[in-house]
Image (cartoon, rainbow, N blue to C red):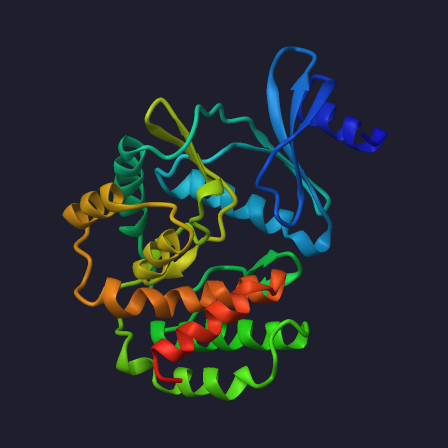
Amino acid sequence: MRQDIRETIQMATGAPPVEFQALQGGCVSDVMRVDLADGERVVIKLGDESTGLMQEAHRLRYLAEYTNLPVPDVLHADASVLIISFIPTDGGITAQAQTHAAELLADLHNISADAYGFDQGSLSGGLLKPAPWTESWVEFFREHRLRHTMQAAVDSGKLAREFVPRLERLMDRLDQWLFEPEQPALIHGDMWTGNVLCNNGKVAAFVDPSCYFAHDEQELAYSTLFGTFGKPFFVRYHEIRPIQPGFFDERVHLYNLYHLLIHVRLFGGSYIQATSDTLDHYGC
């Protein structure tokens, strides 16, 4: 490991690093567990301006200060190095942990604001996710989620321009499927399995937030795309915050189109066909 990174770790923790262990889950940055000379452990993420480490640190601090969501402590953050506390884990997301996650996220989603968005955008693999304050949820989702990400995917060369008319048709018809919620809800924003750390049947922490004020269904939808949560989660969540009819039949696929476009922009591959299949589902 570079000497400057070793010095940054010691400055942030008060102890020199003695061992580095690569961790899974770093799609766009290197993530490592660091054992310190005093017996403690931390996690470091290494990146550059395109990986958004400063934005991630800002969101972790925001969640720690204003919500009850368990998140790691931020020990140091700059454009190339993020140091956070180490969270012990003991396996996957059990049914018991899913129930706990539902309670935590329902509580998070109760936090509201006057508009949709956040005080700054986020970055993921060089992809900007803008979050300007917007009064209408449907407009926010159309312009700052679907249209912005579509254009980024096209500009990257990963998404053929032939998709643009199909996506434009769908965006013109969003009001057929989406509705304005009673109020904005604060969401974590990146609810895939690797960002939910569990221990002893509970959620120990949520990591790598991309939080903003949105429709809570955006969060719920993404948790289904890669199987993060299943029935135990949704049963408990619905008991606390009832899910409106039509979510699982129609809106879930529409909300996940945004995440498919992100994955097209970052990875291409099978996500392109999944995007096409979703457009077919909506007759576009």
Which residue sits at x=50%, y=89%? Answer: 165
Give coordinates of residue 8: x percent, y percent.
75, 30
Give coordinates of residue 168: x percent, y percent.
46, 86
Image vertical order of residue 191 relative to residue 104, above or below:
below
Which residue sits at x=73%, y=44%? Answer: 80
Report whether residue 119 is seen.
yes
Q: Quadrant of the N terminus?
A: top right
Give coordinates of residue 24: x percent, y percent.
59, 37
Q: Nearer the viewer, residue 25 or 53?
A: 25
**Residue 38 relative to residue 96: left or right:** right
Report whether residue 181 is seen.
no
Which residue sits at x=66%, y=19%? Answer: 35
Give coordinates of residue 27: x percent, y percent.
61, 48
**Residue 225 relative to residue 20: left or right:** left
Q: Nearer the viewer, residue 114 or 143?
A: 143
Q: Quadrant of the C terminus?
A: bottom left
Image vertical order of residue 111 relative to residue 101, above or below:
below
Numbered disc total: 0
**Residue 186 relative to residue 51: left or right:** left
Image vertical order of residue 56 relative to residue 271, above or below:
above
Location of residue 279 by image quarter: bottom left
